[in-house]
Amino acid sequence: MLTDAEMEHLKTLARLEVSPEETEALKDDLNQLLGYFGKLSELETEGVEELARPVALSNVFRDDEVVKGLEPQTVQKLAVENEGGFFKVPRTVDGGE
């Protein structure tokens, strides 16, 4: 069972800002989830083979093949805006000006 202090610590780690009522509801939900894990830990698993995935997967590899890429001029024509051979995009970081 989660204590109030542990719940506050989890909220801080997750950067959650929730009301006291929401905190209590979340704590109840997490305690219920932890209870399910407690039930699972009671199961006898001796001799049960570990399973990473329920379905067998296999990688399908292909040989690398060199192909001709697009010409820079073609790519520039696809750009909404370009300048001096570069893509021109809106500023996304404050320049400190």
Image (spheres, helix red, strand yellow):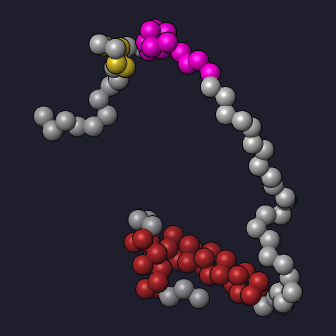
Quarter holding residue 87:
top left
- The residue lying toward the viewer, choosing from 8 and 46, is 46
Q: Taking the image as drawn, is residue 87 in sight?
A: yes
Residue 75 location, x and y as percent? 48, 14
**Which quarter of the image is occupied by the C terminus?**
top left
| Horizontal side of residue 33 vs 74, given as left or right | right
Q: 90 above or below 32?
A: above
Q: Taking the image as drawn, is residue 78 in sight?
A: no
Residue 23 location, x and y as percent? 49, 73
Q: 6 above or below 85?
A: below
Residue 86 location, x and y as percent? 34, 18
Q: Residue at x 48, y 80 (%)?
A: 7
* Badge count: 0
**Which quarter of the image is occupied by the N terminus?**
bottom right
| Horizontal side of residue 97 vs 40, given as left or right | left
Bounds of the magenta segment: 67-79
Q: 13 above or below 5?
A: above
- The residue lying toward the viewer, choosing from 48 and 29, is 48
Residue 80 location, x and y as percent? 42, 14
